[in-house]
Image: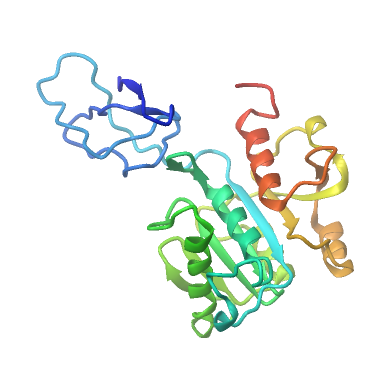
Amino acid sequence: MAALHADRTGALAAGPVLVTDGAPAPRTGVAGRSGLTHVADSGDAHGTHFGRVPYQDPGRPERMRQFVVIGHEVSTDPADISLSDLPGAGRLDLLCRCVATGVFLSHGIREAVRVHLVVADEFTITSDSDTLRHLHPDERNVAARVRDALDATADAIGHMPADVSPGVELRRMGLEATLDRLLDGGGSGAAADPTLVHLHEDGDPLVDAAPPTDPVFVLSDHRDFTDREKSLLAERAERRVRVGPELLHADHTVSVVHNWLDTDGYESY
């Protein structure tokens, strides 16, 4: 099996992964289901008598995680977004951190995660971790992708998405249409029977809840949910939970939820 070593940051990395029949290893920098980081240079396993690792496509994990983040103040005009002043662009910095926290691991990308940014209740920008390419976790890089998405609104016809870049789509949908789409299946590779979870400070403690199989978590930016949003969620959400006793930033909330799911409800590490 691959050997582990510590890099200068102290993070564990994997040595070369041997494969059979010349099959390619998964793409560079993406963590597989084993939790190890695959490397691109797999070598040739032919003639090796020990230590071989049969290649298997990890596929999509049984559980899909989706996050719907409501952005109340971000402009739908890409000309209003300055990469030098993301907080001034309707707290786009916070929304970008939600995307990065949702899809990235340290030195890797999560599998089967989608983050949906609802912008001004007019458009929804979706980032799919399984198909994302050339995206980096810094706020400016994510914000540039959001700006590109808003520049492609003319290509979003009806509920057909505009393909912004690999793994990023824009739909002409507000919150209500987005929630209904996700609960109806949400497109290719999505969960057949998702559970909508409203993340709110007045909800039940997260630690007392059992992790749902295919959750769709809904949270707000720096502003509270509007009365209309609360009504939509009350009609559709199966659960309403809070992540802890203190109010957290939206991106920190996403991180807590990931940890809760990663540990099967804090049961396994």
Compared to 17, does 247 lie above or below?
below
Seen in the image, is 125 located left or right of residue 19?
right
Q: Residue at x 21, y 37 (%)?
A: 41
Compared to 9, does 194 lie above or below?
below
Q: Residue furthest left?
A: 47
Q: Quadrant of residue 170?
A: bottom right
Indicate the position of residue 172 as horizontal and vertical percent values.
61, 77
For the N terminus, which image quadrant?
Answer: top left
Q: Residue furthest bottom?
A: 154
Seen in the image, is 152 located left or right of residue 1?
right
Q: Is residue 99 visible?
A: yes
Indicate the position of residue 33 as horizontal and vertical percent values.
45, 33
Q: Residue at x 60, y 32 (%)?
A: 262
Q: Residue furthest front?
A: 84
Q: Residue at x 9, y 21 (%)?
A: 47
* Count of residue discs: 0
Q: Quadrant of residue 232?
A: bottom right
Q: How is the image coloured?
A: rainbow
Q: Is residue 161 visible?
A: no
Indicate the position of residue 195 as horizontal and vertical percent values.
72, 48
**Near-viewer residue (73 or 33):** 73
Q: Residue at x 32, y 43 (%)?
A: 28
Compared to 153, does 15 lie above or below?
above
For the C terminus, which image quadrant?
Answer: top right
Indicate the position of residue 6 as horizontal and vertical percent values.
38, 24
**Near-viewer residue (96 or 117):** 96
